[in-house]
Image (cartoon, rainbow, N blue to C red):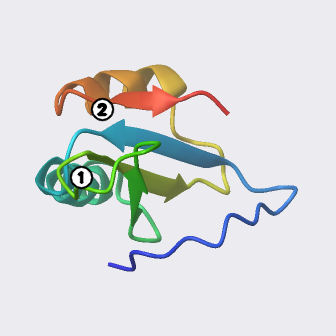
Amino acid sequence: MNDEYDGRDDVDDVRHVLVLPDRDAAEEAAEALADQYRLDEEPLLVRDALAGEDDAEDAQWLVVVEDPAARLSPEDLDAFAAKWEGWREEQ
């Protein structure tokens, strides 16, 4: 998995961002998400350091899911992220 995200959005693309408490949770969630929803592309993992924190322990992890067909339900993803004590970021 790639740890870099360029932040660019294509106009027609739907992107979901799940925020998880640590890398282990993010990796597990990304794998389960790809399996459960049979994604065409593997989700991208991104480390999101909290403002003012240098310690790697003080970081959230983002699971970025491309959904060009807009087939993933935000409500389903909310429940999915909650299994790992996370949430879906509102876009």
Circle on res. 26: 1
Q: Is there a contact, CB below 8 Å, between mark 1 and mark 2?
A: no
Residue 35, above or below 22 = below
Q: In this view, does 2 lie above or below 28?
A: below
Q: How crowded is mark 1: few (under 14 residues within 10 Å), some or many (20 or more)?
A: many
Neighbours of disc 2 within 10 Å: few (<14), some (14-19), many (20+): many
For residue 91, side relative to residue 1 (left or right): right
Tell me where residue 47 appears, x and y as whole percent.
Answer: 37, 60
Q: Which residue is drawn at 65% across and 73% down?
A: 6
Amino acid at dot 1: Ala
Q: Quadrant of the N terminus?
A: bottom left
Number of labels in the image equals: 2
Name the one closer to the observer, 22 or 72.
22
- Name the residue beneath numbered marker 2: 81
Could you tell me which secondary element the residue under label 1 belongs to? helix
**Residue found farthest to the bottom:** 2
66 or 19, which lies in front? Answer: 19
**Quick one: quadrant of the C terminus?**
top right
Vertical placement of residue 3 versus 52, above or below: below
Q: Residue at x 68, y 64 (%)?
A: 7
Residue placed most toward the observer, 71 or 88: 88
Q: Which residue is depicted at the point 39% across and 75% down?
A: 3
Q: What type is the residue that disc 2 sits on?
A: Ala
